[in-house]
Image (spheres, helix red, strand yellow):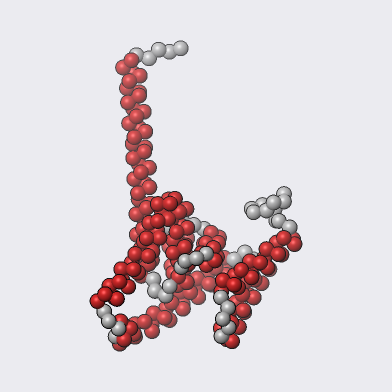
Amino acid sequence: MTAYPPCAMHRDWITACVWMKTHKTERQKMFVSILMDLFLTFAKIGLFTFGGGYAMIAVIQDICVERKTWISHDEMMDVTVIAESTPGPIAINCATYVGYKLAGLMGALLATLGMVLPSFLIIYAISRFIDNFLEIRLIWAAFQGIKAGVAVLILDAGITMIRKMKKKPLPRMTAACAFAAMLMIDFFALNISSVALMLLAGGVSLALFSAKGAPEGKGGASK
C-alpha cells in the first residue's frame, strides 16, 4: 500500500474541498438563473398577453415549447387538458406545471407569481387611479382591435394542437365531436360547461381504451 506524505494528503484534501465548494456554487448559480428565467418569462407572458388563459396558450406554447424547449408538444397538450380540468385559470396552471418541472416547488411558485403579478398590478393601478376605464373612447377602440387579435391567438393554439395530435382515428373523432358539440351549444345557447364536454370525452376514451385493452409501450399494462 502506497504511503503519501502528510503534506500531499492535506493538499489533496484541500483540492477536493475547493472543487466541491465550487461545484456546489455553480449549481446554486444555475438554479437561481433558472428561477429568474422562469419568473421573467412568465411575467412577460402575463404582461403582454391579452384575452385570458386561452389566448395565453399560444404564447406559452411558442416560448416554452418552440424557443426554450422546456416541455414537449405532447406535454403541452397534456398540461392544457389537465389545467382546464383542474381549478384555477388555465394559463396559471400551465405556468405552475412548467415551473415545477424545471425547478421544483420554488420554480412553480415563481412561475405562478410571474404570471399573476403583472395583471394584478395593472388592474390595481387602473381601479385605483382611473374611473370608468372602458368608457374612455381611445381605450374602448383599442380593446375592439384586441378582441380580434385574441380570437386569432386562440385559433392558432387550436390549429397547432390539432396538427400535433396523434394521427389515429380515436383522437381525431373525439376532437371533431367535441368541436361539433361546442358549435351546437353556442348556436342554441345551451348552458353546458366545457369541463363537462372534456369529462365526457375522457369517459368515452377510457371506455374504448378498456374495451380494447391496454396498448403496448408507454402507459400500457400489457406487453
Left or right, 55 with respect to 201, comes to left
Q: How many marks?
A: 0
Where residue 56 appears, x then y in whole percent? Answer: 44, 69
Q: Residue at x 66, y 72 (%)?
A: 173
**In the rendering, at what x and y percent does residue 41 appear?**
37, 60
Front-most of residues 140 and 37: 140
Seen at 36% across and 58% down, the residue is: 39
Left or right? Give the position of 208 relative to 148: right
Judged from this view, the residue extending furthest toward the left is: 129
The image quadrant that residue 159 belongs to is bottom right
Q: Which image quadrant for residue 137?
A: bottom left
Q: Is residue 62 visible?
A: no
Q: Residue at x 44, y 61 (%)?
A: 95
User: Percent from the top left, x then y, of residue 125?
Assistant: 27, 72
Residue 204, position as x, y percentages in the image: 68, 68
Instruction: Say left or right for 220 vs 191.
Output: right
Q: Identify which residue is drawn at 63% across, 66% down.
A: 202
Question: Visible in this render: residue 166?
Answer: yes
Q: Which quadrant of the view contains residue 119? A: bottom left
